[in-house]
Image: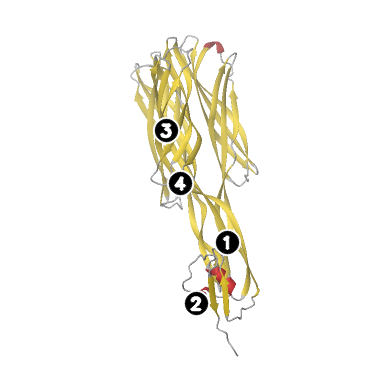
Amino acid sequence: MFDFDKLSVSKFYVAPSVERVVEFSPPGLDMQNIAKVLSLAVEAKSSSVDVYDGYAQVGGRTNFRLTYLDKDGNPRGVDYNADFTVRVDGEFTSDDAVNPVIKVVESDAQANDSLMLSAVLEVSVSAQRRDEIEALIGAEQCYKTTRGIYLPSFIASKTTVAPFEDEAEVGGEIGAVLGLNTNVAVKRAEATDGGVIAGANVYAVVTYVESGEIKQKEFTIELEEELNLDGVQTGDSICVQANVKSAKIVLQGVTDDNVIKVEGEVSFRVQAYRCSEVEVIDDLFTLTNEVTITRERADYVCFDGCGFFREHVSGTAVLGDNRAAVLGINALPYARCYTSKAFVDEDGKLVVEGIVNTDIIYNDENGYNSVRTEIPFSLTIESVQPFSKTVKVCCGVEEISARARKEREIDVELSMSVEVCGYSDVTVEYISAVELGEEKPQNRSALSLYISNDGDEILDLCKALTAMPEDIMAQNPSLQFPLHEGERVIYFRSIKTA
């Protein structure tokens, strides 16, 4: 009589993020050879994640790229790596599929008797697990109403690696390479029948020395990957995460006419989701028996998809009065974006606030100098497609430049990639059990009067009058649901006599 079905649901969970301080002091370094630190760029990547009941253990590597002047005033660049582990507590189970995200929040270099490199990392871990609900989807020999509920489901995932490379002529002799800074921004994530198309741009900046002068070369490399994913359909929501797995510089060409070649690999992690509507029994009624219904409620999150935008930001760095005047800008070895706030305003526009952090290497009367600057930004973004109420935003610096406007003022301009992922909260209410009870006492009166409550539906009348809906409507054709409080419903019965 009653047909129940087990419905599969994907449940998402994000544990509270934790901070981890990574410190590293390079062994065997001659501090007398370091006259001035010009820049410190830091990247952090996860290398492993193990999940247990109640926590996740994340392992990773922090890369410190230091640019400095030696005692002879020559610019130098070195790389150091430091491994780390961090525990993230949360409502995890050992069967969860987890994904760590690591952001560099702060970095610093202290050069005294020894060199101490430090970074503050923010580590967060998201989990995905299968949930299951048993809901009433069919019923016979009774009057019933149905409605649709939305259930989020994980369809498929895939990880792939795509190579990238580009080269540019320098037009001179490279004396030293000071550093390579890379960033990747996702530009496209589209579901097709049986697959996904993912597009991204790699932005690489090489800082080097040519004829004793610090210079930079910028690269923009476009990538597009088509992946086969069983079960994916056009219209599914796609999440693409991309990171630079490896990158290196190869110097080519001839003497006095070098060529810089950048090559490496980008790792794509693609996931497909779908929020499907399932029809379940909302309520039921029988004339002959009492029915006890058990209802349950569950809260889920549906992934709506991502949007990609390109925005421009500008600001000014002001040097202290104790600094010499800026004569020229040489390089911005890295730029990092921190998002502090992201929300959708009352007009449906996305508001993103945060800070861009960068080091500026410049010339003054004493030679090379540098300043670390923070450029605050507040973006208001419109979209043809409406934004979800709940959003997560990831920003990255694509291109950045600076110029000296006054003696102690430096104007900074940059292009920023903004990836917006939307989420919808879904509350699922369903019948989890039905018990058919004793026979009902039959209403034998020839006439019944029902005074409605506000919001009553046809099923409320059926239960109150012990009558089927078609019989009630035949005698009360003007009823419009839901009813308002105080409406009168009259029902006549045909009384059989022996």
Q: CA distance from mark 3 to mark 1?
A: 47 Å
Q: Earlier in the sequence, mark 3 or mark 1?
A: 1
Quick check: 453 left or right of 406?
A: right
User: At x 44% / y 9%, what residue is drawn?
Assistant: 366
Q: Disc 1 residue type?
A: Ala
**Image quarter for residue 297?**
bottom right
**Image quarter for residue 314?**
top left
Q: CA distance from mark 4 to mark 3?
A: 20 Å
Q: CA distance from mark 1 to mark 2?
A: 34 Å
Q: Disc 3 residue type?
A: Met
- The local crowd at label 2, few if under 14, some if 14 to 19, many if 20 or more residues have their Cα within 10 Å, is few
- The local crowd at label 3, few if under 14, some if 14 to 19, many if 20 or more residues have their Cα within 10 Å, is many
The residue that disc 3 covers is 416
Q: CA distance from mark 4 to mark 1?
A: 27 Å
User: At x 48% / y 45%, what residue is drawn?
Assistant: 422
Residue 337, compared with residue 216, is above or below; it is: below
User: At x 59% / y 75%, what residue is drawn?
Assistant: 287
As helix, strand or loop, the secondary structure at mark 3 comes to strand
The residue that disc 2 covers is 475
The residue that disc 1 covers is 135
